[in-house]
Image: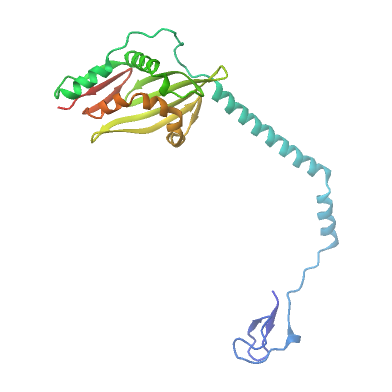
C-alpha cells in the first residue's frame, strides 16, 4: 500500500491525505513512497512458465479428474443397486391367513378397564394388516401401486416395510420406530430406515414418512384411536403386548 510520510512527525498517512492525520502539517505529495516491487529472477520465471506447460503435470491432472469421476460413478451405481435390491422378506403369497380380531379386541378392552393385556404375534398382526388393507383399497395410493406391508417386532422396536410397484418393478421402503403411548397419544420416534437395502438417515424417514406411509397409516385410523385409549404398548421379539387402562 502506498503511504505518505509526514516530514514533521514521521507519521504514516494514507495516500489520499493532504494534511497529516497526526500533527496537521501539509504533506509533500512528492514524498509518496511505495513498497519496492520484487523483480522475479529469470531462472524463477523460466521454472514457473515451464511448470505451466509441463505435459506430464497436465496428464496427471487429467488422470486425477478421470479417476475421481470413475469413483463417483461407481458410488452412485452401488447406491442405486442397493436401493433396487429387495430386503430380506418372506415370499409374497396370494392367500391371507386367518387374522385375529384385533380391532374388536381393542374396542372391547378400551371399554372395560382392568382387562387383561392383549398379546399378538408378528404373524397375527401381519395377517390383520393384510386383511384390513385388502378391504380398503380406495384409501391406498393409486401410484405407485401398493403391493403389501409387513411389520416386524423387536425389543422396543417396530419396523414397517412397504412394497410398491412401478411399471411392474417392485421397490421397498422401510422405517424403524420406537413407539409409545403417552398422555392419550401415540408417539413414534424414527430409529432407522431403508430404501431397498440402502440405509438412510432417520431424519429423511421423518421428512418423507407422510409420503411413504401416509396412506397406510390413514387406513388404520380406527385402530390408532383405540390404541390411544390403552395404557401402554410394548414391543418384544416377534410379538406386541397392548395393556388396557387399569
Q: Position of residue 63 (x, y in %)?
A: 75, 37
Q: Residue furthest front?
A: 138
Query: Which quadrant would the N terminus be assigned to in this image?
Result: bottom right
Q: Is residue 31 left or right of residue 81?
A: right
Q: Position of residue 16 (x, y in %)?
A: 68, 81
133 lies above or below 176:
above
Residue pictured at 79% horizontal, 43% vertical: 58
Q: Quick one: 29 or 147, which is closer to the camera?
A: 147
Q: Is residue 121 left or right of residue 199?
A: left
34 lies above or below 205:
below
Residue pictured at 81% horizontal, 59% vertical: 44
Residue pictured at 84% horizontal, 59% vertical: 43
Residue pictured at 69% horizontal, 32% vertical: 70
Query: Which quadrant would the C terminus be assigned to in this image?
Result: top left
Q: Quick one: 222 or 203, which is closer to the camera?
A: 222
The image's colouring method is rainbow
Q: Is residue 53 left or right of residue 176?
A: right
Q: Position of residue 21 (x, y in %)?
A: 61, 86
Q: Is residue 82 left or right of residue 140?
A: right
243 lies above or below 205:
above
Which quadrant of the structure image shows residue 69?
top right
Amino acid at each position: 500500500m502506498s503511504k505518505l510520510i509526514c516530514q514533521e512527525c514521521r507519521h504514516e498517512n494514507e495516500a489520499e491525505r493532504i494534511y497529516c492525520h497526526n500533527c496537521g502539517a501539509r504533506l509533500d505529495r512528492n514524498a509518496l513512497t511505495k513498497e519496492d516491487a520484487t523483480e522475479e529472477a529469470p531462472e524463477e520465471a523460466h521454472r514457473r512458465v515451464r511448470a505451466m506447460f509441463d505435459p506430464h503435470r497436465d496428464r496427471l491432472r487429467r488422470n486425477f479428474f478421470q479417476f475421481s469421476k470413475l469413483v463417483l460413478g461407481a458410488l452412485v451405481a452401488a447406491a442405486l443397486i442397493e436401493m433396487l435390491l429387495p430386503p430380506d422378506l418372506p415370499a409374497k403369497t396370494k392367500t391371507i391367513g386367518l387374522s385375529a380380531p384385533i380391532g374388536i379386541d381393542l374396542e372391547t378392552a378400551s371399554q372395560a378397564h382392568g382387562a387383561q393385556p392383549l398379546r399378538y404375534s408378528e404373524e397375527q398382526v401381519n395377517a390383520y394388516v393384510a386383511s384390513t388393507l385388502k378391504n380398503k383399497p380406495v384409501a391406498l395410493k393409486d401410484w405407485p401401486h401398493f403391493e403389501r406391508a409387513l411389520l416386524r417386532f423387536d425389543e422396543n422396536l417396530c419396523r414397517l416395510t412397504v412394497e410398491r410397484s412401478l411399471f411392474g418393478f417392485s421397490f421397498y421402503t422401510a422405517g424403524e420406530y420406537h413407539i409409545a403411548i403417552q398422555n392419550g397419544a401415540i408417539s413414534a420416534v424414527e430409529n432407522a430406515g431403508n430404501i431397498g437395502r440402502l440405509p438412510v438417515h432417520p431424519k429423511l424417514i421423518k421428512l418423507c414418512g407422510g409420503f411413504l406411509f401416509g396412506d397406510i397409516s390413514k387406513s388404520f385410523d380406527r385402530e390408532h384411536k383405540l390404541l390411544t385409549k390403552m395404557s401402554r404398548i410394548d414391543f418384544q421379539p416377534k410379538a406386541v403386548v397392548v395393556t388396557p387402562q387399569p
